[in-house]
Every structure is written in structure tokens, then in C-alpha cells.
């Protein structure tokens, strides 16, 4: 093996070298095949090696790959913004392009603060969020995130934004059951705003379905309607972080569409370019743009590569491809099929405590005891065991964190490309079943289960 100076996620681990991909499959240089059961980091939504996208990118590259946004606009950037306006709910009509989900949420934070400045209320600078959340790795985005593992080294530099318990019915933070709970988890936002003072709070940010820090946790019906009402009551903006859930991943164009709630700002990433180029967006409503338009006339954020023609051409081709192949509509049925299959596994393997999700964003949470839902102790590292075993067997699943503060739990996300076919879901499930069975047997032998 040649010496490597590439810094990989874990320096003491070996990573296979990817050679090519087609559809839901990836192949390494040794010819081993992998089912991309998680679309990488829930990103490769239309599958790998789609020629239409490669051709659109080549065509754009032959014209011009980069222009600086302060000097030029470009056809693909304009067309993508127009397409996103058609896709987005309500008056979310404006797109600010960036390069990663973290930049999209961080821009959302800045836009929210700027909006209140333009409205003559500069004290509104805090953004509330939930303890079970991940909004990105840069300091502003991390400040809004409740992902303890990713925060802990940088806590002195972070704002203390996370404050509200999540809508996590499997382990209700209030030990209640829906609907008798009367959505206490949503009402907690009202209390949090009152505690901080609504004159201090610019916005509340939430992932419509909780991803990396929860593994596809779907809130109960009525939750987002309640959140929207509380935000409106206190003059607080609602930011939907749809970096993982947006662009059809959950069977609707945006996951928040399930609840007919219209946010003020939406952050997008991942599936927006389905992995073909670094691309993300902060989408902003007319209501928020108006005072900026008539006020300072500039959004005080942006990056060198913002709205570059090469990435936006990829994004535009991806959305066109999704429309032509009806991938969003198809994701509802495929997701139900996948969830049903996972629920059968849940009945047969008591290591699976919960199965959840919407569309093709599904999560599997592991427990040491299905009756009291006790998580495994963190030293056992069940998530890692599952991910590693799956990879050995040629299946990629995404490691997530489940459980709450002080009771970390193990979970994986299964989120294959939306282009997956029925028989490919069967194949994915059959490999995953083998993985679950072997891990359950191993844990039994070790006495953890
Ligand atoms: N928000 C959410 C909901 C995410 O899932 C992620 C990435 N996992 C991010 C933001 C950050 O995106 P990126 O890694 O592209 O910066």
C-alpha cells in the first residue's frame, strides 16, 4: 500500500478506494460491490453514474465553470433558483447558494439576525434549537446543534443555543404518550422563549425529521403546527433545516410539506446536487426578503464558490432528472415498502427497539432490552459494529446517534437512492438481516444481550 497523506475521518482505519458507481451500487478498486444503502451521507439521492448529470456538467464546463457572484450571474444559477421557487412551499421564493449544509444553516442564522436588524429589533440574536439535532460543523451551525460528540471540544467557542427537548416519542423526554401528552415537547418552545425573552430570540431551527442526531425521528402530528403558532405568537422566525430531509428524500419535495407548515427560511444541501457537486442553498421567504430588499439590500454572507455555474448546473440537472423520473412521488411507496420490511426484522430480532422514518429516510434503533428500551453501554459500540459488519458484507448504512443526553443510544440510518428498485430493496434488506442476526448473536455470546 502506498503511503498516504490524505487525512481521513479516522487515522487508524483503512478505507476502501472507490473506483466507480452505477445506480445504487459502488465498486472499489478491488472490484468489491457495495449497496449504497445510505446514499453516502444521505446525499446520492438519484444514484451513482447518472449520465444526464455528467453530460450537463460537461456542457457547462465547456462554457464556463466559475464566475464570481459579485461580478456575474449565470444561466444555471438563475434557472435553479427558479426551479427551487416552484418546488418550495408558500412564499419561500428566494435562493442563496452556498457549498455545504453547514454554510446553509449558518447563512440562515445570519439572515434571521439581519431580518430583525432591518426591522429595527437588533436585540433579537439568539437562535433556539433542540437538544437532539445536527445543523452543521462550522461554529455558528454547531452552536445550534445538540450533537454532544461534535460539540464537546469547542464548547468554549459556542453559543449555548440548544434548549428544547425533541419530539422523540419512542423515548418521550416527558415520559408521556401521544396524544395525551398534548404536545408538551412543542409547548416547551413557548417556555424556552419566555425564559430567554422573545426580544432576544431571532429564530427557532429544527430538522423536520431528525437525522444524524436521532436516526429519522418523525414528530407526532400537530407538532409543527404548534411550533409555527408559538413562533408567530412571539415574533420568532422558523428555520427548517431540510439539508437531509429536503429535495424528495422523505417522499415530499420538502419534509415539512407533510404538515402543511410554511417556514420562513429553509436550509438545503446534500440531495440538492445529489452528490454530483458541492452545492447547498438557503431559501428565504418574501416576508424575510422584503425588509432586506428595501433596507441594506445585501445579505451579509457568501463564499467564493457561492452560486458557481458548475455546481448549479449539476443541481439543475438533478432536479430535472428527478422530475422526469418522478423520483419524489415514487419515494413514498418505496419508503413504505422499506419500512414494512424493517418492521418485520424488528419483530424477529429483539435487538431492534424501534424502526421509523418517512419516504426513503428510515432509522433503526438498537436496544439491549425491548421492554425497558435500555440502550447498550457506549463501550459496546453497537452502531460501529453494525456499520462495519454491513460494510464487510457489501452494504453501506449511516451511523447515527439516538437516545438522549446522558443515555446515548445506537442507531443507523437506511436511506438508499430514491431510484432504488423493489428487488434492490429486497436485496438490501436481506443483507441487513444477516448483519443484524450476526451482531445479535455476537452480543448474546458476549453477554451484552
Ligand atoms: N444539517 C443537517 C440536517 C445535516 O444532516 C447536515 C449533515 N449531516 C448538515 C446540516 C451539515 O451539512 P454539511 O455536512 O454539508 O456541512
Image (cartoon, helix red, strand yellow):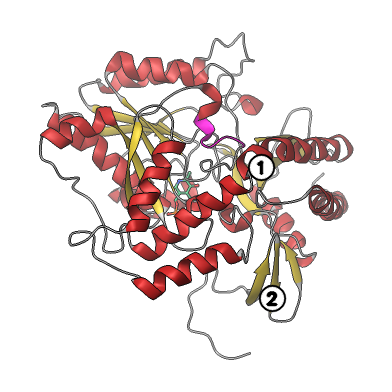
Is residue 368 visible to the viewer in this orientation of the structure?
no
Magenta span: predominant SS is loop
Which residue occupies the extreme bottom position in the image?
2
Q: Secondary structure at mark 2?
A: strand
**What residue is pinned by disc 2?**
28
| 220 relative to 271, above or below | above
> Camera-side residue: 39 or 215?
39
Quadrant housing residue 347: top right
> Camera-side residue: 270 or 316?
316
Left/right placement of residue 211 relative to residue 26 reads: left
Question: Rounded to the nearest whole Å, what is the CA distance between mark 2 and mark 1?
Answer: 25 Å
Quadrant housing residue 196: top left
> In the rendered image, which quarter contains the C terminus?
top right
Q: Position of residue 159 (x, y in %)?
A: 29, 41
**What residue is pinned by disc 1?**
360
> Camera-side residue: 64 or 101?
64
Which residue: 66% across, 42% down? 360
Which residue: 31% across, 41% down? 108
| 18 relative to 117, above or below | below
Which residue: 71% across, 41% down? 364
Which residue: 35% across, 63% down? 309
Amino acid at each position: 500500500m502506498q503511503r498516504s497523506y490524505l487525512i481521513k475521518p479516522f487515522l487508524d482505519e483503512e478505507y476502501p478506494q472507490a473506483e466507480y458507481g452505477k445506480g445504487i451500487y459502488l465498486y472499489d478498486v478491488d472490484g468489491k460491490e457495495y449497496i449504497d444503502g445510505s446514499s453516502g451521507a444521505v446525499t446520492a439521492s438519484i444514484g451513482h453514474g447518472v449520465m444526464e448529470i455528467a453530460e450537463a456538467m460537461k456542457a457547462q464546463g465547456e462554457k464556463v465553470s466559475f464566475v464570481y457572484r459579485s461580478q456575474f450571474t449565470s444561466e444555471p444559477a438563475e434557472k435553479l433558483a427558479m426551479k427551487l421557487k416552484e418546488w418550495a412551499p408558500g412564499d419561500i421564493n428566494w435562493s442563496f447558494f452556498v457549498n455545504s449544509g453547514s454554510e446553509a444553516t449558518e447563512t440562515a442564522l445570519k439572515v434571521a439576525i439581519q431580518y430583525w436588524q432591518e426591522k429595527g429589533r437588533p436585540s433579537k440574536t439568539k437562535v433556539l434549537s433542540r437538544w437532539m439535532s445536527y445543523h452543521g460543523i462550522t461554529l455558528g451551525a454547531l452552536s445550534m446543534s445538540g450533537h454532544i460528540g461534535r460539540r464537546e471540544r469547542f464548547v468554549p467557542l459556542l453559543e449555548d443555543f440548544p434548549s428544547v427537548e425533541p419530539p422523540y416519542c419512542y423515548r418521550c423526554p416527558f415520559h408521556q404518550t401521544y396524544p395525551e401528552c398534548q404536545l408538551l415537547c412543542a409547548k416547551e418552545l413557548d417556555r424556552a422563549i419566555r425564559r430567554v425573552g422573545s426580544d432576544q430570540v431571532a429564530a427557532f431551527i429544527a430538522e423536520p425529521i431528525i437525522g444524524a442526531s436521532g436516526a429519522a425521528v418523525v414528530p407526532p402530528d400537530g407538532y409543527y403546527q404548534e411550533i409555527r403558532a408559538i413562533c408567530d405568537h412571539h415574533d420568532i422566525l422558523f428555520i427548517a433545516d431540510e439539508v437531509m430531509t429536503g429535495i424528495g428524500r422523505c417522499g415530499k419535495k420538502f419534509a415539512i410539506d407533510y404538515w402543511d407548515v410554511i417556514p420562513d427560511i429553509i436550509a438545503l444541501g446534500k440531495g440538492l446536487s445529489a452528490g454530483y457537486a458541492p452545492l447547498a442553498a438557503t431559501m428565504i421567504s418574501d416576508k424575510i426578503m422584503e425588509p432586506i430588499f428595501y433596507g441594506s439590500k445585501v445579505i451579509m454572507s457568501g463564499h467564493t464558490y457561492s452560486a458557481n455555474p458548475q455546481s448549479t448546473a449539476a443541481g439543475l440537472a438533478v432536479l430535472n432528472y428527478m422530475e422526469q423520473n418522478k423520483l419524489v412521488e415514487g419515494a413514498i411507496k418505496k419508503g413504505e415498502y422499506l419500512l414494512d420490511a424493517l418492521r418485520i426484522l424488528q419483530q424477529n430480532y429483539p435487538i431492534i427497539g424501534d424502526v421509523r422514518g418517512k419516504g426513503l429516510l428510515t432509522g433503526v434503533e438498537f436496544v439491549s432490552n425491548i421492554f425497558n428500551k435500555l440502550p447498550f453501554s457506549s463501550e459496546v459500540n453497537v452502531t460501529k459494529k453494525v456499520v462495519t459488519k454491513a460494510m464487510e458484507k457489501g452494504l453501506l448504512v449511516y451511523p447515527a446517534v439516538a437516545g438522549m443526553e446522558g443515555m446515548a443510544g445506537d442507531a443507523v440510518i437506511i436511506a438508499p437512492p430514491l431510484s432504488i428498485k423493489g428487488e434492490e430493496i429486497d436485496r438490501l434488506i436481506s443483507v441487513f438481516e444477516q448483519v443484524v442476526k450476526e451482531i445479535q448473536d455476537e452480543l448474546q455470546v458476549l453477554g451484552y444481550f
